[in-house]
Image (tube, grey):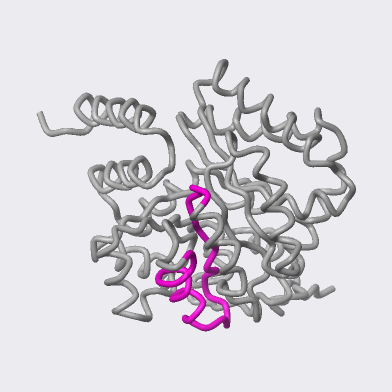
Amino acid sequence: MTLKHPRTGVAFSSLEELQGSHDSFKTLTGNRMNNSEETLSFFEAYYGGFEVLKTTQDYHDLAMHYFERAASMNVRYCELFFDPQGHTRTGVSWQTMMDGFRSAQAKADKDLRVRSAWIMCFLRDEPVNSAMDHYLAALDYRDMIVGVGLDSNEDQRPPMLFEDIFDRARKDGFRLTAHCDVGKSYPIEHVRQVVCSIGKIGADRIDHGLNVVESADLMESIRSREMGMTICPWSYIRHQPLEEVFGRIRKLFDAGIRLTIASDDPAFMEDTWILENLLVVRRFCKFTDQDMIRLADNAIRDCWAPDAVKEEITAELRAVNEKYLAPS
């Protein structure tokens, strides 16, 4: 009996071939996957998961699971994205959601040495007025939320559709970022709007965005502005060739652009967290120990933590470097 993968079209005629297909690296090397169906499947699974979150305890438990995994990898500070529109449309109130997040945040700080802040994302495939309504509701939680972002399906939804909200958020003191998904058919103009235009002068950070390598002037804009880029390689190599993904990362790194390695929906990405993303980028970009220190230092510089927190983590990073990595 022959089985055919519904999205890639690869045929398997034996159990061994099917088992071998689970090697993500092997199946993706040299291939480019048309992932429009995969994108829709991801969103179906992602938003479907929201249906089981009903109580404050549910949101506390969800956040604590994240914090515990982060702590096990020696993460000291994290900025968590969340999509309130996806939760309120299931009937969950802001108070239910944010009270759960708040209690988990406090417990992680006290018990796990993990400090955190939240980045509220607008769903770009929802109406702009819905995003504004949620922005106004979020103002009650300014002590938790450090920035606003933009995510979900990017197709025909350029960032500047949300300019009124980005402009208001910047004036209100929030930091700005936006997803620029990798390897999609969306125009480089979407990336340009994030880098140069939203909030009048462009974002403070850019999420993903490897397609900037297609534009020398965009790369220079990012470098000259010292704009950080949050890179999540495991989410790209699921549908892009290894050599292309890591070649782009290496090109940006060598150009002096401040890259930060992060995780992207780890529960939906083969359980790949920050550690797995760091390991894979080290291996395939051939980064040295000092390159990895530079990536960690970028993460500290480009996060939106208070200066005192940044100084504390920087001191710890320097101590590790001097003890274990610096030449004797």
**Magenta stretch in the rendered image:** 172-199
Picture quadrant of residue 257:
bottom left
Residue 197 in magenta stretch: yes
Number of marks present in the image shown? 0
Residue 110 in magenta stretch: no
Q: Residue 234 in the image: x percent, y percent? A: 53, 56
Above-or-below relation of 241 to 167: below
Above-or-below relation of 240 to 214: above
Out of 201 and 253, give the one closest to the viewer: 201
For this orientation, the residue located farthest to the top is 111
For this orientation, the residue located farthest to the left is 328
Picture quadrant of residue 130:
bottom right
Q: Residue 41 in the image: x percent, y percent? A: 76, 66
- At x 74% / y 66%, what residue is drawn? 129
Out of 88 and 110, give the one closest to the viewer: 88
- At x 59% / y 23%, what residue is drawn? 108
- At x 53% / y 28%, what residue is drawn? 71
Classify residue 133 as left or right of residue 151: right
Check the picture and name the quadrant holding the C terminus: top left
Q: Residue 146 in the image: x percent, y percent? A: 53, 43
Out of 304 and 287, give the one closest to the viewer: 304
Classify residue 56 as left or right of residue 138: right
Picture quadrant of residue 204:
bottom left
- At x 79% / y 56%, what residue is drawn? 47
Q: Residue 243 in the image: x percent, y percent? A: 41, 70
Check the picture and name the quadrant holding the N terminus: bottom right
